Image: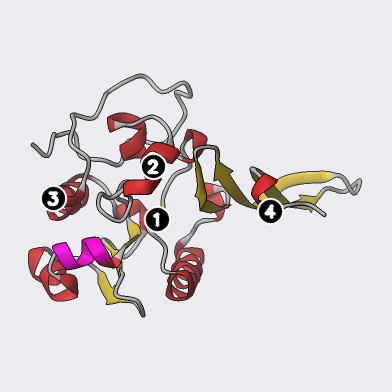
Amino acid sequence: MLNPLDVRLAEIAVYRLDDEGMPGGELLRMGVARDEGAEDWVRLSAETPQERFRPAAQARWTELLRDFSQEVDPCYAQIGFRRALGRTEHEERVGPPLPRMTLPQSRRRLRGYEWLMVIPREIAQQLGGADGITTAGDFHRVETLRDGAILLQVTPEFDGFTGEAIERTWHLLRPALRPGMPKRFRDSDPEGPASRIWYADIA
């Protein structure tokens, strides 16, 4: 029998079949990963193409993340652009380079921040809970989940998380972020998504 601890990565993908019955465009990909050196932690992911992520879909994904977080009390969760190796953009540009290096501290320091995110209860308490977060900025949705975590939706729609909204989120969360100046570098994919973090050091 397979020991679950031996599983490092498992994925499933859903495709639309073309006229010949062959897989065409990918509609959904879901995965579970366990990192060597952080075996007590599991990373769950779900991906959909950007062109399918319209406002109606954003609302469904938001409720899915909310309902799931009510059940499992994650140490961090977000909806954003996919980054290599399961990293958040903050991890990618500030470090450390691998999620297994940030997971053990993820209830003391946020792994990152995005348009929609779940702040674990330990960090939410440091920020003053829902009342403190609501007072600190004009955020679209601030909701306390069952175990005390906070669901934070910065703007009504995904594409609205730019400029001032990113800066406002960074100012709120800076006490809980890992220090360091984010690196600016040319992405390997010039057609890739625009950066969605604030380029300043919390120090």
> Does residue 77 appear left or right of residue 57 in this picture?
left
Residue 116 in the image: state x and y as whole percent: 35, 59
Residue 80 in the image: state x and y as whole percent: 41, 49
SS for dot 4: helix
Dot 3 alpha-carbon crowd within 10 angstroms: few under 14, some 14 to 19, many 20 or more: some
Rendered image quadrant of residue 88: top left
Q: Residue at x 28, y 50 (%)?
A: 110
- Residue 175: assigned label: 3
Q: CA distance from mark 1 to mark 2?
A: 9 Å
Q: CA distance from mark 3 to mark 1?
A: 18 Å
Residue 85 in the image: state x and y as whole percent: 50, 35
- The N terminus, quarter of image: bottom right
- Residue 78: assigned label: 1
Q: Upstream in the sequence, badge 4 or badge 1?
A: 4
Q: Give the residue type that dot 4 points to.
A: Pro
Dot 4 alpha-carbon crowd within 10 angstroms: few under 14, some 14 to 19, many 20 or more: few
From the viewer's side, name the closer residue of 73 and 192. 73
Rendered image quadrant of residue 59: bottom left
Please give the range of residues in magenta: 122-126
- Where 195 sits versus 76, above or below? above
Q: Give the residue type that dot 1 points to.
A: Gln
Which residue was labeled with disc 2? 88
Q: Is residue 5 magenta?
A: no
User: Of all residues shown, which one is farthest toward the right?
Assistant: 20
Q: CA distance from mark 4 to mark 1?
A: 25 Å
Which dot, 3 or 1, sits closer to the camera?
3
Which residue was labeled with disc 4? 4
* Residues at discs 2 and 3 in contact (Cβ within 8 Å): no
Q: Upstream in the sequence, badge 4 or badge 3?
A: 4
Q: Upstream in the sequence, badge 3 or badge 1?
A: 1
Q: How is the image coloured?
A: secondary structure
Q: Give the residue type that dot 3 points to.
A: Pro
